[in-house]
Image (tube, coloured by chain):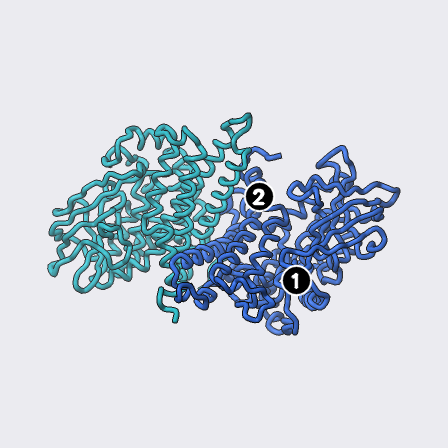
Amino acid sequence: MTRPHDFGFDETAQILKDTARRLLQDHCAPEALHRLVAASSEPARATEGVWDPSLWRKMVDLGWTAVAVPEHAGGFGMGLVAIAGLAEELGRAAVPSPLVATLCATYVAAACDSDAAQQLLRRIASGLSVSLAGTDRRGSWEPEDTAVVVDETGALHGTAWFVQDAGKVGALLVKAKSSRGVGLYLVEVDAPGVTMVPDAILDLTRDQAHVELRDVRDAQVLAEPGDGARALVAAEPALLTIVAADMVGAAEWQLQTTAEYARTRVQFERPIGFFQAVKHPLVDLMVQIDAARSLVYDAACAFDHEPAAAEVCARMAKAAASDAAAEGSGRSVQLHGGIGFTWECFIHIWFKRQKHNEVLFGDGAYQRARLADRLIGRIGETA
Amino acid sequence: MTTSAPSDSSEQAAFRAHCKAWLAGNLPPRPSFRLPLGPLEIATIEQLEYLCDWQRAAHAAGLIGCDYPREYGGGGLRDCQWIANHELKAAGAPFFPNIVGLGMAAPTIFHHGTEAQKRRLLPPLFSAEEVWCQGFSEPGAGSDLANVQAYAERDGERWIVNGHKVWTTLAHFATWMILLCRTDRARKYEGMTYFVAPIRDGVGHGVAIRPLVKMTGELGFNEVFFEDYPIADDLRLDEPGRGWAVAMTTLLHERGAGPLVTPSSGGGVGDDGESTLGAAGLVDLAKRSYRHGRPASDDPRLRDAIVQLLIRQRAFAQNERRAAVPALVDHPLRLPLQHKLTLSELLQDTARLACEIEGMAATLHQTDPNAPAGGRWPHAYMNSYGFTIAAGSNEVQRNILGERVLGLAKSK
C-alpha cells in the first residue's frame, strides 16, 4: 500500500477540525474552563460538576462519537488522520469530556471480530461513551496484563485500574484473563457487581477511577479469550496517536499563551521576549511541537494506509509528543514567573492535563525502549 | 516505509518515471579516489571534475532546474524538482558540486535578475560549467550580516570594489561570486547593493584568493580580498540600495525556506545507505562496537539515545512532508525557517553520538587504516560545526524564528 504525500488530510478532515476549534472556542474558552474545573482548589475526586454535559451533547449531535466508527456500523468511517485533527483541538481547549476515552475504545471495538463488537460500535455512533478498563494496579500497558479474571461461567472478577473518565462514560470495555488468554468484554457501568471508586487525581480536566468487578455476570463478549490481545495490539497505534495529538494541541496552546505573555510582560524596560534566555527556549519548544505534530500525522496516515508501519510511527509520535508536553508544561509555568505558579492563572490546567497524558499508555522513555526492541533488536540478540 | 505519491499530477507521474528510468542506467562509475562527504569539502581538481561531469549529465537529462523556464536552461515543469531530488536520493546518486549556484545564486538571479542576466547566467550554472561562490560574510559581518563593509563606489558604467570577504566556500574553483557590498555608508540596511562578480577573471586584476584551512585540516573555503576591483554595472542585481532585500531571497533559499526547491542529491539524512550520515547508520555501528565487553547496542542509555535520533530524523522528513499541506501549517514560515536549524543539529548530534558509540576507535583519523567506517564519524562531527555556524548561526536562526514566527521583540 502507498501512503498519500498529504497524509490523506482531506477537506472533510479540515471541516471536522475547524468545527471543533470553533465549538470549543465558543463553549470551552480558558476563562469558562477555569470557572468550570478550578472553582475549588480541592483535589478532583468528585466527578460531578467538573464537566459540561450540555457541551458533550453538542459534541455527540455533531457526530463526534461516530467519526471513527466504520460506515458499515453506522459511523462516518473517517481516517485516523481526521480523528487526530479533532484530538488536537480537544487538547488545545483542554476540554473535559469522555471523547478521547470513547475514541480509544472505538478503535479497540473495531479491531474485535464479533457481532457484539459491531453492536457496540453502533451504540457508540449513536452517542454511547465508553472507556477502556484494561490495566492493572501497576499501570502496565502490556497487552496480556490485567487484574481482572473471567471464570468458566463468563463472570468477571477483580479490579480494573486507571480507568479514564470513568465517571462520565456509560459503559466499560474490560480486559480480562482466563486460562485461554485475554478476552474483551462490554460492561454497563450500572451493571450489578460494578463499583466505581474515583481516584483523587491532579488533572482537573478529566476523572479517573478504579473499577471493582464482583461476579459481574451480564458482560458481553467482544473478543473471546485468546483473541483480546490481538485486538488490543492492532488498536494500540491509534490510541497512542490520539493521545499524542491531544498533547500536541495542548502544547501549542502552552506555546502561544506563553509567547503572548512574553510579548506583553515588561521587565528591564523591555518585553521579556526580547531576552534570548526567554526567546530561545520558546523557539526550541516550537521546534519540538512541530516535530511531534508531523509525527502524529505520519502515524495516523500509517495506521490508515500501511498498518505494518503503524506501530513504529505511533510510538515515535507518542514519544515526541510526551517530551513536547513535558517541555511545554515546564516552560509555560517558568516563563510566566510568579503568576504562573498560582491557582488563578490558567496555565496549571494544561500543565496537569499534559502530565497525565505524558504517562498514559506509556511515556517517552517507555515508547523508545519498545522502539529500540523493534529497530535495534532486543538486548542480548546481537552476537 | 516509503512515501510514494498517488497524488502526483500526470506531469509529475511521467517525470518521476523518467527520473527512475534515467537513473537506473546513468549513475557515474565509482571513482578511483575518495569522494568528499559534501560540496563544502571538495578539495581537489579531480574531485571537482568528477562531480561537475555528473552534474552536467544530470542537467542534460532534465533532473536539475526542472521548475525553471526552458529559456533559462530549466525544464519548464511545475513542482517537479522535489520529485527529482527524491529519486536521486533513492538511487544513491552522488551530490551536486555547484551548491552555492543551485541553492542560492539561481533563485536570486531568477527573482531579481534582468532577462539578459537570467539567459546568460542560469544555463551554465545548472550544468556546472560555471561554479559559484558567495561573498557575504566579512571579518566584522558574521551573525550581523548587515554590517558588511566591502565598499563599491560608482564610477560611470562600473563600480570599484575594495574589501575583504571570508568563509568563501568554493572560491578557489569558482567562476562567479554573488557579492554583497556597501554602497552607502550612511545607511545600514538600505545602504547595500548586490552584484554578480566574475571573480575568476578578476584574479590578479584586483581579486586575491587565499585558502583558509578548516579545523579538520582540509581546504574548502577561502578569504577573498578586493583591491580597486572593477565590476560592470550590468552585473548589478536589482537596484542600488536594494542589496539587503536581494540577500534575503538568497538567505531564505540557503536555509531551505525559499519558494524554489533546490536541486539536491545524495548525502543527506533519510538515506539508509552506509555511505551517508543518517541516524540509521548508528544501529549497525552500535552492533559492531563494544562497551563493557558487550555490544554497544545492548547499552540501555545508548539505545535510548539512538532511538531519539531516529525519531528526530523521521520528524525532520515528516516536517518537510507537512510543510506541503497548507491545512496543517499555522504560519507559512514556521516550518521552512526551522529547516536549517533542525537539520544541522540533527547531523551534529548524530555524528557526536556515533563517536561516543565508537569509543576509543573514534580517536582514529580517517587516514588511519584501522579507523571504523573510514573515520567518517569524527570527521563528520567536526565538519558539522560548519553547518551549525554557517548561513546564519543557529543562535541567529533562533532569533529569527522567535521574532518572525512568535512575534517576540527584536534583538536588534
Q: Position of residue B285 (x, y in %)?
A: 47, 65
Residue shown at 14%/53% (left/top)? A157
Q: Amino acid at mark 2?
A: Glu
Q: In whole angstroms, how far apart are the C-alphas of marks 1 and 2?
A: 28 Å
Subunit that carries the residue with mark 1: B
Please identify the quadrant where the C terminus of chain B is shown.
top right
What colour do you see for chain B?
A: blue
> Which residue corresponds to mark 1?
B96
Mark 2 belongs to chain:
B
As drawn, B315 above or below A92: below
What is the drawing colour of chain A? Answer: cyan
- Relative vertical location of residue A98 with respect to residue B382 in this rendering, above or below: above
Left or right for A107, reference B117: left
Indicate the quadrant where residue B90 lies. bottom right
- Read off the residue under disc 2: B395
Quadrant of res B183:
top right
Query: Is B363 in front, or is A74?
Result: B363
Q: Could you tell me which secondary element the residue under label 1 belongs to?
A: loop
